[in-house]
Image (cartoon, rainbow, N blue to C red):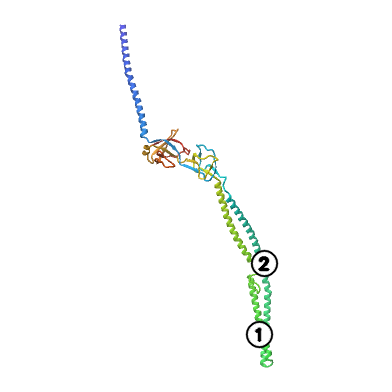
Amino acid sequence: MDGFAGQQAGLAREKLLDVGGQAKAKAAPLAGRLARGLFALAVLGTTAFFIHDRFFVAASDNAVMAGSTIILRSPIDGRVDMQPWSPEQTFAANSPVATIVNELVDTQRLAELRATLATIEGEIAALEQRAAGTAALLDAAILSAEAFRRIRLEQLHPRIAESEALARAAAAKLAEAEAAAARGEILRRQGFTSAATLDVLRRDLAVARDQMQAAAERRASLLAEQKGAAEGIFATDNATDRSISQQTTDRLALTLVETDAMLADRRARLQAAQRHVEAEERRLARQSQAVLVAPSATALAQLLVQSGEFVRAGQEIARLAACGERLVRAELDERTFRSLRIGQRAAFRPAGRKEHLPGEVIQLLPTSLAPGAPRVRPQAILQLKASDGACETGQIGAVRFG
């Protein structure tokens, strides 16, 4: 019985093994089919993603971040003097980029203006000395004229006194002649004197009257002369109404006025000459040396000359890219260009970085073959949001439009 039972158990184990083997054989094809199905789905999904990304997503893989281009030009002819800037060089606002030195500037006009200025200064010094001398002579002449007037008045006082005495004497003689003539008239009527004697008395009375009138007129003339002398007017028979001292004073005063006018003219010319000299000095300073500075925060985009090179006025020295604008210029194909619109959202991903910088489309530029700035492909200009202040201009990357 034990042997039979053992045989039965062995048969049972063999059946179980056969069933497990059959199950494994059936499960193996199912796993393979499942793996192949998953692989096919992955390939299909990848293909669909690339097809969607290629034909249904607006993007550009050729984009560069750059602000507006600032061109620095030489304002004068001269030699360039600047540091050996690196391609990644950035400049703060108003920082120097290059210096233009003109060693051949013409200074002849400045020398002529300075010579004219020195001549005018010499003329002013001479006129000032002449004015000072004339003023001193005028003061002396005024003192002399005043002394003459005072002496003349002093001379008139005794003459006036003399004329008054003569007038009194003439008045006394007139009174005596009038009394004698009156007595003669009485004596003639009484017959005590002759007619000839009466005629003599009458003639003496007429003479006395004439002498009295002459004395009065002489006194009046001297009083008028005294009044004129007090006012600086001298009326005499053999002289003019102005004394020699007064005429000298008048001449010196006129000379001083003329000298002052000449001084005013020279001083005005001096101020004009000084302005011309200062303007010429400023012009020569601009022509002899010019410092080119960055107008704002910028990065060096292109250096067009080397230090020590001679340049002409208006020649381009360097091209700078503004840091503050954060503009992205992306090249597009025609399909993507037609699908975009102004104000559409976009994101710029710089090469080598994972972050996406948000922005929006502010300008769409179609293809242009215009000379000077041809565009063989359409372009979109993006305005990125404000940065942390770092100058990121010149970075390349890709753009995805939302």
Q: Relative to the observer, which residue lies in front, 202 or 242?
A: 242
Residue 398 placement, left or right of 209? left
Estimate how packed mark 2 is, as few (under 14), some (14 to 19) or many (20 or more) residues with alpha carbons within 10 Å. Answer: some
Q: Earlier in the sequence, mark 1 or mark 2?
A: 2
x, y percent for residue 153: 66, 71
Q: The residue under label 1 is which amino acid type?
A: Ala
Q: Which residue is mark 1?
A: 206
Q: Residue at x 66, y 65 (%)?
A: 141
Residue 52 placement, left or right of 241? left
Q: Could you tell me which secondary element the residue under label 1 belongs to?
A: helix
Give the number of the disc on residue 357. Answer: none
Q: Residue at x 36, y 34 (%)?
A: 55
Q: The residue under label 2 is which amino acid type?
A: Ser
Residue 99 placement, left or right of 397? right
x, y percent for residue 166: 68, 79
| Figure quadrant of the C terminus | top left
Q: Which residue is mark 2?
A: 144
Mark 1 and mark 2 residues within 8 Å of each other at the beta carbon? no
Q: Relative to the observer, which residue lies in front, 50 or 230?
A: 50
| Figure quadrant of the N terminus | top left
Note whether 73 is above or below 5 in the view shown: below
x, y percent for residue 401: 39, 37
Q: For residue 260, what is the image quadrant?
A: bottom right
x, y percent for residue 40: 34, 26
